[in-house]
Image (cartoon, rainbow, N blue to C red):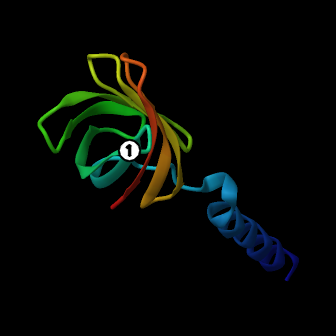
Amino acid sequence: MKKKLMILLIAALFVAMIFSTGCKKKFDITGTWTVYGDWYTWITFSGTVTFSGDKTNGTFVDFSNGTGTYTVDGNNVRWEYPSGTFYIGTSTDDNVMSGTMNSTSGLTGTWNAVR
């Protein structure tokens, strides 16, 4: 009887570990997102950006065929164009992220994205 109880306890601990936050799946940016942005609050835009690669880095192509690279560290995201313009932010869940953007010309703004 003690053996069965011990096996049941070990099985319960194993199941608890699988569903604990320590085994939480990582944010996956890959796929197509609709991005909304405001440069200096007077230039607004929206369009799609498609991220291809893996959960930590890869490439992207935007709605005007602009391309660049991205990195993800936990919930922190960054994507950058070869011109030096970059977007940094965080994901709040698997389908929402937001942050700030900066251009080499000094323009700054905010963005948010959903899929």
Q: Position of residue 113 (x, y in %)?
A: 39, 54
Tell whether 40 sits left or right of 49: right
Element at label 1: loop
State which quadrant residue 80 falls in: top left
Which residue sits at x=45%, y=37%?
109
Q: Where, quadrant-wise, is the C terminus in this rendering?
A: bottom left
Which residue sits at x=42%, y=61%?
95
Which residue sits at x=82%, y=74%?
3
Vertical comparison of 100 with 115: above or below = above
Q: Number of marks in the image?
A: 1
Vertical comparison of 73 with 9: above or below = above
Foreground pick, 42 / 106:
42
Q: Position of residue 93 (x, y in %)?
A: 52, 60
Tell whether 61 sits left or right of 115: left
Which residue sits at x=26%, y=17%?
82
Q: Position of residue 23 (x, y in %)?
A: 61, 54
Foreground pick, 111 / 75:
111
State which quadrant residue 65 falls in: top left
Vertical comparison of 51 with 20: above or below = above
Residue type at mark 1 is Trp
Instruction: Give the labeled residue for mark 1.
Output: 42
Is residue 2 something one can see in this rendering?
yes
Tell whether 75 sits left or right of 45: right
Is residue 77 something one can see in this rendering?
no
Q: Pick out the residue farthest to the front.
A: 42
Q: Residues within 10 Å of mark 1 (few under 14, many from 20)?
A: few
